[in-house]
Image (cartoon, rainbow, N blue to C red):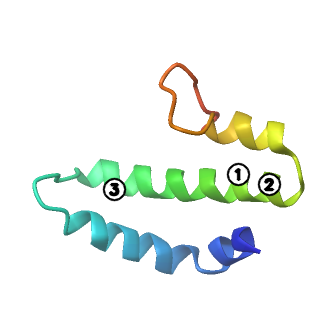
Amino acid sequence: MMSSFLATHREELLDRCAQKVSERPMREATTVQVRNGIPLFLAQLQRTLEAEEQRKPLESLRISGPPGGDSCSSPRWG
């Protein structure tokens, strides 16, 4: 399952994501954004995938918000 993959390879994924962020042209992220944002994103993704794997679509929606990134929604990030 994808959530297990994320859990198993978390540190490597954090390192690789931070490297990719540092290589983005004209979109420099601050150290705080990289240190906090990437782990937050991976944790949210893992929880969303776990909810989907357990066939809990409403929980998944509460965690990540609706498809398309509707700015009116407020995903649960904690």
Residue type, mark 3 in image: Val
User: Where on the picture, by quarter, is residue 62?
Assistant: top right
Q: Earlier in the sequence, mark 3 or mark 2?
A: 3
Question: Residue 37's x, y, as percent?
Answer: 42, 50
Question: Residue 55's x, y, as percent?
Answer: 89, 52
Q: Residue 76's mark? A: none
Image quadrant in which the N terminus is located: bottom right
Residue at 64%, 34% (x, y): give it: 76
Circle 1/circle 3 CB separation < 8 Å = no
Residue 10 drawn above or below residue 27:
below
Question: Residue 4's x, y, as percent?
Answer: 74, 74
In this view, the mark in front (1 or 3): 1
Q: Is residue 62 left or right of residue 58?
A: left
**Label 2, residues with CA under 10 Å away: few <14, some 14-19, many ≥20:** some
Q: Is residue 63 left or right of residue 14?
A: right
Dot 3 corresponds to which residue? Answer: 34
Residue type, mark 2 in image: Glu
Residue type, mark 1 in image: Thr
In this view, the mark in front (3 or 2): 2
Q: Is residue 32 visible?
A: yes
Q: Is residue 2 left or right of residue 20?
A: right
User: Where on the picture, by quarter, is residue 52?
Assistant: bottom right
SS at mark 1 in the image: helix
Q: Residue furthest top?
A: 72
Count every numbered label the image shows and give the total: 3
Q: Earlier in the sequence, mark 1 or mark 3?
A: 3
Dot 2 corresponds to which residue? Answer: 52
Image quadrant in which the C terminus is located: top right
Dot 1 corresponds to which residue? Answer: 48
Circle 1/circle 2 CB separation < 8 Å = yes
